[in-house]
Image (cartoon, rainbow, N blue to C red):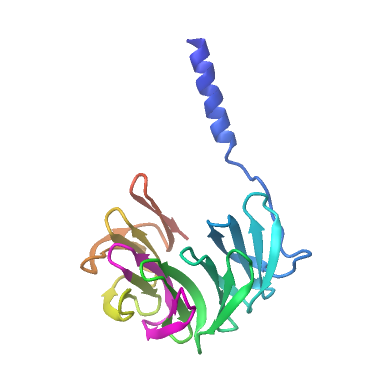
């Protein structure tokens, strides 16, 4: 009996001790770029992490095994968003003040293209792997830029609501949901025809949105209403409004237990 208890305690201690700060990677240094880091994405094919910053005009590439910086890739200025296309192994960088999107080859870390977004300032991405398209919400012109993942060409810019804040893609319905902060609604974009097919009214100041693939629902935080709207991604209707804490601002879905976690700022 003592032996069993001792083994259980040992396993428990090892499990808990694994949750610690393993390393701190400082930017900038000899690599420059990525000053005030604020955007991350992960390349699962080559095990790389990409870091974008408020200033510096570059993305730092980190080896996921060694945690060492392996490249600096010059892009536009003020990087608020990064996105990985796993079908073609490319990384898309949203250059906010440059009003452009830089495209990096995930294997070579080389810049292979750049797309201008017009008067819009790239703010957030989502990726549609069914049609191999990248969606970028732009502040300033209230549009979503749609990019073909194979040829990296701008397919179109579509008008959404005022101050698009966050994007999420429903793989089951092949729709992209765009929260519009100043319009108090969500634009629903059809992933096949790339047009807004519906506008859903939600609470005041919708910010974050997350998709639940178990039940094909999207959850949207309404920052000034202190609620979360639950949206059926088949009917695109709000099926429930859940009171939460003050200033809900971020969401995460736990697929193992089918729960949504909401951060109240």
Of 234 and 109, the residue lying toward us = 109
Over which residues does the magenta segment extend? Answer: 146-175
| Residue 129 position in % (x across, y down) | 40, 66
For residue 166: magenta?
Answer: yes
| Residue 206 position in % (x across, y down) | 38, 70
| Residue 209 position in % (x across, y down) | 38, 65
| Number of on-image labels | 0
Instruction: Examine the rendered structure and indicate whether residue 10 appears above or below residue 245.
Output: above
Q: Is residue 175 visible?
A: yes
Q: Report whether 62 appears left or right of 13.
A: right
Of 99 and 129, the residue lying toward us = 129
Q: Is residue 100 visible?
A: no
In this view, the residue farthest toward the bottom is 119
Taking the spot 50% from the left edge, 22% from the top edge, the residue there is 8
Taking the spot 24% from the left edge, 69% from the top edge, the residue there is 236
In this view, the residue farthest toward the right is 30
For residue 161: magenta?
Answer: yes
Indicate the quadrant where residue 34 lies.
bottom right
Taking the spot 52% from the left edge, 65% from the top edge, the residue there is 89
Instruction: Examine the rendered structure and indicate whether residue 241 appears above or below residue 96.
Output: above
Indicate the quadrant where residue 211 lies.
bottom left
Taking the spot 53% from the left edge, 26% from the top edge, the residue there is 11
| Residue 255 position in % (x across, y down) | 37, 49
């Amino acid at each position: 009996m003592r032996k069993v208890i001792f083994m259980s305690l040992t396993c428990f201690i090892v499990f808990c001790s694994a949750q610690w700060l393993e390393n701190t990677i400082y930017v900038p240094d000899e690599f420059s770029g990525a000053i005030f880091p604020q955007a991350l994405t992960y390349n699962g094919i080559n095990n790389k992490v990409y870091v974008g910053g408020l200033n510096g005009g570059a993305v730092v590439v980190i080896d996921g095994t060694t945690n060492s910086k392996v490249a600096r890739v010059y892009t536009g200025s003020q990087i608020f968003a990064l996105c990985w296309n796993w079908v073609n192994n490319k990384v898309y960088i949203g250059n906010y003040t440059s009003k452009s999107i830089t495209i990096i080859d995930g294997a070579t870390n080389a810049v292979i293209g750049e797309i201008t977004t017009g008067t819009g300032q790239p703010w957030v991405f989502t990726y549609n792997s069914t049609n191999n398209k990248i969606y970028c919400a732009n502040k300033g012109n209230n549009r979503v830029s749609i990019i073909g993942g194979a040829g990296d060409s701008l397919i179109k810019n579509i008008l959404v609501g005022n101050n698009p804040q966050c994007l999420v893609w429903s793989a089951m319905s092949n729709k992209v949901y765009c929260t519009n902060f100043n319009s108090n609604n969500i634009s629903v974009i059809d992933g096949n025809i790339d047009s807004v097919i519906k506008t859903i009214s939600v609470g005041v100041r919708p910010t974050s949105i997350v998709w639940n693939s178990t039940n094909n629902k999207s959850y949207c935080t309404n920052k000034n209403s202190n609620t979360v709207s639950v949206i059926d991604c088949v009917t695109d209707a709000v099926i429930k409004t859940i009171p939460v804490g003050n200033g809900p601002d971020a969401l995460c879905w736990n697929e193992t237990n089918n729960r949504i976690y909401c951060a109240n700022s």
